[in-house]
């Protein structure tokens, strides 16, 4: 039984490596520094981790500069 779990985890990790679209919706995040298009991967007290839609880099945005967030439906 432990082998089945290990195979499932390895399969999921391999699938995640080849999928180009994250499993979270694309969002337009309005900040005091301008808009950001990306995928919010994690929200923590004081900041959010965003996978930028253009450069695929993980950016940290401070919560204090976020004005609004809008999910962009059908934009994957």
Image (cartoon, grey):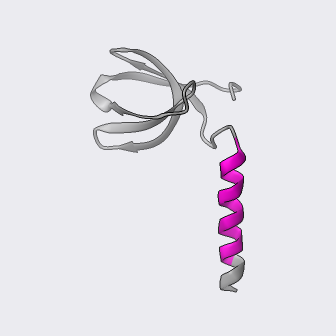
Give 8 or 69, whichever is nearer the viewer.
Answer: 8
| Image position of 43 (left or right of 13) | left
Query: Residue 13 placed where, x, y %?
Result: 65, 58
| Image position of 30 (left or right of 17) | left
| Image position of 41 (left or right of 65) | right
Please tell me which residue is depicted at 72% across the width and 79% down the height of the picture.
4
**Residue 8: in magenta span:** yes
Query: Residue 38 placed where, x, y %?
Result: 53, 28
Image: magenta residue range:
5-19
Please tell me which residue is depicted at 57% across the width and 27% down the height of the picture.
53
Q: How many marks?
A: 0
Please tell me which residue is depicted at 67% across the width and 66% down the height of the picture.
10
Where does the N terminus fall, quadrant-wise? bottom right
Where does the C terminus fall, quadrant-wise? top right
Instruction: Residue at the far bottom: name it.
Output: 1
Whether 70 is drawn above or below 10: the answer is: above
């Amino acid at each position: 039984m432990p082998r089945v779990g290990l195979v499932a985890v390895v399969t999921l990790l391999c699938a995640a490596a080849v999928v180009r679209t994250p499993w979270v919706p694309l969002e337009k995040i309005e900040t005091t520094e301008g808009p950001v298009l990306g995928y919010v991967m994690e929200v923590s007290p004081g900041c959010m981790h965003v996978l930028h839609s253009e450069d695929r880099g993980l950016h940290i945005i401070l919560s204090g500069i976020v004005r609004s967030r809008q999910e962009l439906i059908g934009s994957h």
